[in-house]
Image (spheres, helix red, strand yellow):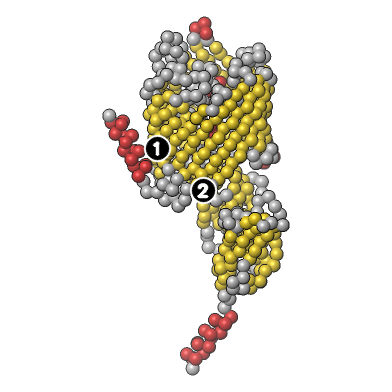
Amino acid sequence: MAMKSLVSVICTCVLTATATADAQSFTSELSVVTGGSSEEVAILGTQARLFGELESEIRVYVEGAWATRSDAETDAFGGAYPYAGRLQLVEAYAERIVHGSRWLAGARLGRYRTPFGIYSRGDHAYTGFLRAPLIRYDGYYGLSNHFLEGGANLIVGTPSVNAEVSLGVPQDIGTAVRRPGFDPVVHVQAYRGSLVVGFSHLRSKPYERRSFARGQMVFTGVDVRWMQNGIQLRGEYIAGRPFDSVSTDGWYVDAMVHKPALGPFTLVGRVEDLDYEAGRRSAFNTRYTAGGRVQLTTAIAGHFNVLHQTEPLANGKKTGIDVGLTVTLRHGW
Amino acid sequence: MSSLLAAALWFASLATAAIHLDVQGTARLGDTPEPDVVVWLESPALSRSMDSRRTVLDQRNLRFSPRVLAVQVGTIVDFPNNDRVFHNVFSFRDGKKFDLGLYPIGSVKRVTFDKPGVSRIFCNIHPQMAAYVVAVDSPAFAVSDDTGAFTLRGVPEGSYTYHAWRAGTQPLTGSVTLRPGQPLDIRWP
């Protein structure tokens, strides 16, 4: 009851705060991605977005995606969008954020990505990596990048330290779709200098069928980001269970280097590990990825990844190559 | 006698004082009005105030606003993050080189544009975000709006060298004598 009252108070304060914007502005964006992998898979995907701000300073974000691939047995190109072969609504929300120099409050209502750790689309979609971290791919009993929440996401605190709370129900896309149920997520984040440290906790329903997966999905994570002088380091450690009697824990560390001497190239590297403890079905994997992103024109970017892992890929080999091309068109009003 | 002398001096000063104009103009590419064109004037007659100036290049809804910002050399530009995601503003190709590091919503970082030039501004996390800051060594400058129109305010009547810049083409330079009611039209062929 107290939580419900708190949510009502924050939503009311945020939505009724004095608006100062003098005009509405919107941006539409269309991204088309195509690529291929040595795992003998080819993909084609597209995402359409509309986002912007009303005169009332309420921000709106709507995103739909369509993508297909020739083989579903691989995690190649699974960064932030599923390959369902049909048009899907991804995010659709309205939000209002108000802040001063020492305080911050916001409310997001609708359908949005699960606010756990490093979760935004921009962090995982075509930043130079063509696969999601193992711990964030929906086929590996971890915390899927395709998890979505339907409900209210509140943020309060200061720019330096803030807490984000999501109260909603699962609205996932992809192959890991959680069963219905109340789905709280907490993300606390602190920032100093160019270092950002976060802590996340999620309690939800499993995405496997009820007869196979009992109990709760519970994950806890720590995320760290640092960026300066064109070098970004980021990583997450996530541990928990996708359902009772098994456990999953994993981590990844990404390095992204974008220096003047590299021109249009951004170099990327990732080291990661995933452990799924489930008796006879246990799986352990360590993967190394190196590659880059090249901005060919304002609208076109190419991506290439070479990866090696301790367990065989879908094609039986331990080393793979992924190549992708993204075209993004933007129009502002 | 002294009153007469004062009056004479006042009339003399009126006669020699420059008339300050609001010069209106239009920037075009061919026959098409061109937005986001920076126009500035150069002349020894233009006074260069050393007062500290300040302006804002906002980061909001995953884009910079305005997309083209013109400032006088010495201006401090605030780069507030008004998005819920982190931004990392940088410029390292031309003009002012800087990297503001990672910072969240509610935070502001500042850069002083202390020499003339065009700085291309990007976000290291969101490659689609791009803007230009054009620092000019002149107090008389303007940026054209969506209809290509611009206004140079408070310019003394006289002869000037004008400059015009737009992204992706060579800057234009020319001479103009500004008189009341005379527009300044800029046109790239």
The foreground one among A65 and A53 is A65
Classify the position of the N terminus of chain A by image quarter: top left
Amino acid carrying label 1: it is Ala
Residue that sits furthest to the bottom in the current view: B1
Q: Which residue is mark 1?
A: A107
Q: Nearer the viewer, residue B168 or B8?
A: B168
Residue A103 in view: yes
- The answer to which of A189 and B25 lies nearer the viewer is B25
Point 59% across, 20% down: residue = A75
- Quadrant of the rendered image containing residue B92: top right
Query: Mark 2 sits on what residue?
Result: B58
Marks 2 and 1 belong to one chain: no
Q: Helix, strand, or loop for circle 1?
A: strand
At a point 65% along the width and 64% down the height, the residue shown is B185
Q: What residue appears at the point 61 percent right and 13 percent down from the top-left corner?
A: A311
Q: Chain of mark 2?
A: B
Q: Quadrant of residue B146?
A: bottom right
Pinpoint the chain carrying mark 1.
A
Residue B174 in the image: above or below residue A291: below
Q: Position of residue A64 (x, y in %)?
A: 52, 32
Disc 2 is placed on an element classified as strand
Q: Residue at x 38, y 21 (%)?
A: A181
